[in-house]
Image (cartoon, rainbow, N blue to C red):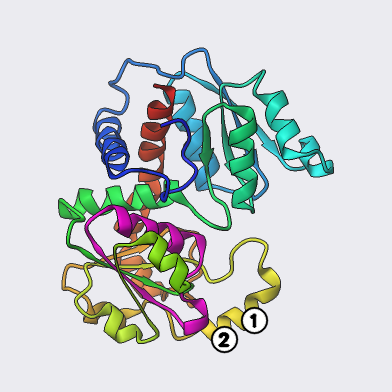
Amino acid sequence: MKHLLSIEQLTREEIERILQRTAEFKNKRGQISARPLAGQTWALIFSKPSTRTRVSFEVGIRELGGESIYMNAADAQLGRGELIKDTARVLARMIHGAVIRTYAQSDIEEFAEFSGVPTVNALTDDEHPCQILGDIFTIIEKRGKIDNCIVTFVGDGIANTARSWLFAAGKLDFELRIASPKKYQPKKKTLERAGGRVMCTDNLEEAARGADVLYTDIWVSMGREAEEARREAELGPYWINEALVKLAKPDALVMHCLPAHRGQEIDAKTFEAHAQTIFDQAENRLHVQKAILAELAG
């Protein structure tokens, strides 16, 4: 594995190897002496602000023996119009890898192509692969497996997290249900590309019935703040609350990739009732990203 740009580009074997290493890193945190990033410096290039992603990558790189440099768009010439391929070719002579959080998926793919250094997608408008790998690990950690589970995604079914879930369903043996208004559902071409067992519906109750996992994300991603009022009106009925949880299996997991807006995509009481799972999810970003970095280090 040279880069991690997309769940779509991973094989099932690569996903399983990442998850296995994630368990090892979590169970033996502080006990593993190997430092696969020793002597390396990784750049964190973030066009979008972050809490969990930045901290988990910086801590992870340090625990693997490496150093990190944080750059936001204003710090780099990218913010002043330099071509991505030029920035990539310059940084490749100085760094050993890059973690990029930006808007366009094409930008991160271009950086990987022209830099040649291991590159990790820390979020784009198209995908959020590290998040979903951490979420899959959380499900396996709590339920023993994800095979044959029913994962119901509630909300914006064409958001980056939903898209990564879609490709994950095509790689692993679980059923994905996307409960969204029709205009927020994936296109037929995308569904065909992903494969897997996927149901898209605007019937929220049908999608939640018998689910093993209820999953949601914020309705308004960074860069789309001007759409907040419209999105809130259109997605308003598609949220996780106590009534919806009762339709799922009695031991269903409720998951949220954070940050959470209580009263929009999830109600406060349901969030707090499932806070243990949600914050385990957040912690597991650290462990899964360490596994990814170790895989890329060879």
Under tag 2, what secondary structure?
Answer: helix
Judge the density around disc 1: few (<14), some (14-19), many (≥20) Cα neighbours within 10 Å.
Answer: few
Q: Secondary structure at mark 1?
A: helix
**As shown in the figure, which amino acid type bears the numbered disc 2?**
Ala
- Asked if 86 appears above or below 272 in the picture, the reply is above
238 up-or-down from 224: above or below = below
User: Residue 222 in the image: x percent, y percent?
Assistant: 63, 61
Residue 96: give x, y in percent of width and height. Answer: 56, 21
Relative to the observer, which residue lies in front, 94 or 273? 94
Residue 151 visible within the image? yes
**Is residue 243 shown to the viewer in this render?**
no
For residue 173: magenta?
yes
Image position, residue 72 (x, y; %) = 70, 40
Q: Is residue 262 left or right of residue 88?
A: left
Split into 4 quadrants, where in the image is the C terminus? top left
Q: Looking at the figure, which quarter contains the N terminus? A: top left
Image mark count: 2
Residue 233 numbered tag:
2
Question: Which region of the structure is painted magenta?
Answer: 158-185
Tag 1 residue: 229
Residues at discs 1 and 2 in contact (Cβ within 8 Å): yes
Residue at horizontal 54 percent and vertical 85 percent from the top: 234
Does residue 187 appear left or right of residue 76 in this picture? Answer: left
- With 245 as the anchor, is 42 left or right in this view? right
Q: Nearer the viewer, residue 244 or 294?
A: 294
Measure the C-alpha gap from mark 1 to mark 2.
6 Å
Residue type indicated by callout 1: Ala
Q: Residue at x 45, y 61 (%)?
A: 163
